[in-house]
Image (spheres, rainbow, N blue to C red):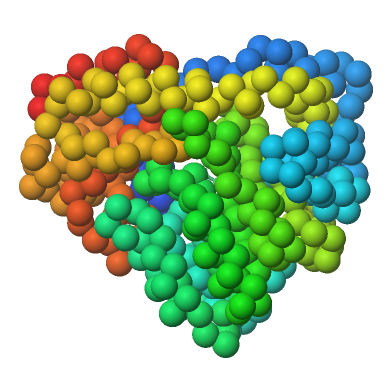
Amino acid sequence: MFTAIPPLESRLPKVGTTIFTVMSALAAEHDAVNLGQGFPDFDCDPKLVDAVVGAMRQGLNQYPPMPGAAALREVIAEKIGRLYGAEYDPATEVTVAAGATQAIFTAVLAIVRPGDEVIVLEPVYDSYIPNIELAGGKAVTVPMTADFRVPWHAVRAAVTPRTRAIMINSPHNPSGTILRDTDMRALEAIAVEANLFVISDEVYEHMVFDGEPHRSASSYPGLAQRSFVISSFGKTFHVTGWKVAYCAAPEPLSLEFRKVHQFNVFTVNTPVQHGLAAYMRDPAPYLGLSAFYQRKRDLFRAGLAGTRFRLLPCEGTYFQVVDYSAVSSLGEAEFSRWLTTEVGVAAIPLSAFSEQPVDRGLVRFCFAKKDETLGLALSRLSKL
Ligand SMILES: Cc1ncc(COP(=O)(O)O)c(C=O)c1O
């Protein structure tokens, strides 16, 4: 017998299956090289696995403290201090989260109230706008320039009395651009003047190329006092499936962050936290990550240089954006589908990162792949 259920009005009526899931499924179906979704096709350092297994064998298998294992929070605070000159108290200002996605949503829920506006820059990582809307806020999108820089005058113009926060992401997914010192100072001036919070998504902080430093919000006092700085071990240590990340923020911000975190996930996987803490005592793996990915970037770009794709600059992340207008006049979504099914290489359309999709003839490739995977993709792409 069927009885009525309450009307199921979607909280996110515009949201469907993400393009990443769609393209990965299409890639698998057509045996395409998957340069779409951002994850490595190689394994992590076996020492990291050993450290996690070691933690399990030591019996570190029960709930850790709500904000994260103390040992991990300590190495995180040390790392931030050493790299960015910022001091965070691991006891009160660093929280371990179940991936950056959860940390970002938690930060949004901690600060955004119904009716608040939050500025995001387009192209925008796909979870930001749904996060803001779930919190009852309104996302105000500011398009980046054609070469994926931030037009700070437009950001300033987008601030209203209702603006509560701005969300930034550097190195930037999908464009591969980075924010420089002048950008951070412009952001700091706006955030201080308008008294805004900042959510700084720095998950690609250890992938910055050509000798440029990563500019963390934590390095700028005016920003650090109002920022939730978020990074992800998944990106840094080639373990995207582990979903462990952190948020560093001054105590009053962390206090509110933890209240939401406590009743959302409560705690994060204990042995992985202890394994990461032991592994991170040696900074070499994360300090060497930029060089590791720069070599892959150069290999991939050198291969693409012989094709009709036009390469956009790649200053950080493991993403390379290309202009395919000399290859095809299809729209970005159709081109990505065609490339996957007919050429055997999956890519992500840049339009997937915009609320109002604009077709600029650009797609994103992920080069966090074995050299032979990149070689296979290049051999297919060079036929175009
Ligand atoms: C910009 C950006 N932020 C956040 C995330 C999510 O990170 P996590 O896998 O730790 O949730 C990603 C993953 O692709 C990302 O590209």
Q: Is residue 43 above or below residue 199?
A: above
Q: Quadrant of the N terminus?
A: bottom right
Residue at figure coordinates x 34%, y 30% from the top left? 35
Q: Residue furthest bottom?
A: 161
Residue 336, quarter of picture: top left
Foreground: 182 or 18?
182
Residue at figure coordinates x 41%, y 46% from the top left? 177
Q: Is residue 110 above or below residue 254?
A: below
**Residue 256 pos. (x, y %):** 80, 65
Residue 310 seen from this side: yes
**Residue 376 pos. (x, y %):** 27, 16
Residue at figure coordinates x 87%, y 16% from the top left? 57
- On screen, residue 260 versus residue 308, left or right, reads right
Q: Quadrant of the C terminus?
A: top left
**Residue 166 pos. (x, y %):** 56, 67
Residue 304, quarter of picture: top left
Q: Quadrant of ligand 1?
A: top right
